């Protein structure tokens, strides 16, 4: 069963060499454009994250604190991001056992207790 809208598509192996080359060239040009756009976005974000607010903290520091506060308040995704950033959990790796989940909960409780002690 054909997917709607694909009945008029012509496979690359059924196109002429000239058509294949033209399509590949267009793809390469677009790939370069997207790569430059991503590089510009990355440079802009780096610049903005390193800016300081009126209290002298960088926005990078504030974002990190927000991530940590979320983890302390029980946001599992924030905690996972922290572990991935620290290299304690491979990016994209799924917890597969209850034992791993228990370790995460224990670490989160430890961080929460330490944060409460620091506030006092």
Image (spheres, rainbow, N blue to C red):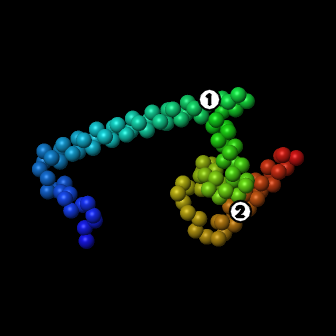
Picture quarter with the N terminus: bottom left
Q: Tell how many labels.
A: 2
- SS for callout 1: loop
Above or below, 2 relative to 91: below
Mark 1 to mark 2 CA distance (whole Å):
34 Å
Task: Spot the residue most to the right.
Answer: 120
Hey, which quadrant is residue 54 in on the image?
A: top right
Hey, which quadrant is residue 52 in on the image?
A: top right
- Tell me if mark 2 has few (under 14), some (14-19) or many (20+) residues whose alpha carbon lies within 10 angstroms of its own: some
Image-based side of 79 in relation to 10, left or right: right
Q: Is residue 83 visible?
A: no
- SS for callout 2: helix
The residue drawn where x is 67% and y is 39% is 62
Image-based side of 56 in relation to 6, left or right: right
Hey, which quadrant is residue 89 in on the image?
A: bottom right
The residue drawn where x is 82% and y is 51% is 116
Position of residue 42 measured from the top left corner of the image (x, y, whole percent): 49, 36
Above or below, 118 relative to 5: above
Position of residue 17 measured from the top left corner of the image (x, y, whole percent): 13, 48
Position of residue 115 measured from the top left corner of the image (x, y, whole percent): 79, 49
What residue would you read off at disc 2?
105
Question: Of callouts 1 and 2, which one flags the residue occurring earlier in the amino acid sequence?
Answer: 1
Which marked residue is nearer to the observer: mark 1 or mark 2?
A: 1
The residue drawn where x is 64% and y is 35% is 59
Q: Is residue 104 visible?
A: yes
Image-based side of 107 in relation to 38, left or right: right
What residue would you read off at disc 1?
51
Q: As rendered, which of 114 and 89 lies closer to the eye?
A: 114
Residue 87 badge: none
- Tell me if mark 1 has few (under 14), some (14-19) or many (20+) residues whose alpha carbon lies within 10 angstroms of its own: some
């Amino acid at each position: 069963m054909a997917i709607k809208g694909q009945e008029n598509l012509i496979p690359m192996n059924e196109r002429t060499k000239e058509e294949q080359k033209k399509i590949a060239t267009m793809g390469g040009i677009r790939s370069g454009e997207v790569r430059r756009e991503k590089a510009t976005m990355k440079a802009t974000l780096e610049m903005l994250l390193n800016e300081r607010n009126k209290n002298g903290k960088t926005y990078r520091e504030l974002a990190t604190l927000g991530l940590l506060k979320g983890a302390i308040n029980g946001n599992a995704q924030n905690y996972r991001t922290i572990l991935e950033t620290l290299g304690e959990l491979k990016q994209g790796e799924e917890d597969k056992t209850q034992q791993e989940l228990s370790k995460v909960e224990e670490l989160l409780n430890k961080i929460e207790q330490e944060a409460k002690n620091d506030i006092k």
